[in-house]
Amino acid sequence: MEEKAKILVVDDDADNLRSVGAMLSYLGYQVILAGNGEEALARIKERLPGVILLDTIMPRIDGFEVLRQVKEDATTKTIPVIMMTARY
């Protein structure tokens, strides 16, 4: 059986974090959750996810800064990042 990717979900809204995480878990993915930018950067180094779903607007370290740091690091720069927002 093929192992599904580890997906890091980053969102400062706990409801969004839980619902996206639950949906991905139900689909068989290994889900890693982070509630802010600092936590996301720590989880990336600890678990090296295959994909990152990243909220854009968060306090202190926003998604754009997390993205910048991920793409500047040789170890993580090839991880696909999908930016998401609740704003429209």
Image (cartoon, rainbow, N blue to C red):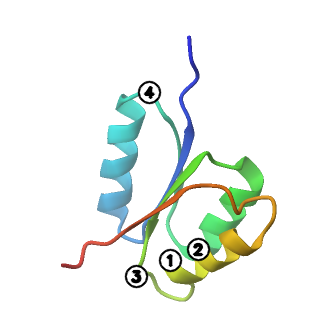
Asked which secondary structure carries label 1, the reply is helix
Q: Position of residue 28 (x, y in %)?
A: 44, 27
Residue visible at 42% across and 77% down in the picture? 56
Disc number placed over residue 28 in the picture, else none? 4
Determine whether label 1 and label 2 are within 8 Å by CB: yes
**Residue 3 sits in which quadrant?**
top right
Classify 9 as above or below 5: below
Mark closest to the chain's N terminus, 3 or 1: 3
Q: What residue type is disc 1 on?
A: Gly
Q: What residue type is disc 3 on?
A: Ile
Determine whether label 4 and label 2 are within 8 Å by CB: no
Disc number placed over residue 57 in the picture, else none? 3
In the image, taking residue 17 as reference, residue 40 lies left or right, namely right
Q: On the rendered image, what quadrant is the C terminus found in?
A: bottom left
Along the viewing direction, whichever of 79 and 25 lies nearer the viewer: 79
Q: Label 1 belongs to which residue? A: 63
Q: What residue type is disc 2 on?
A: Leu
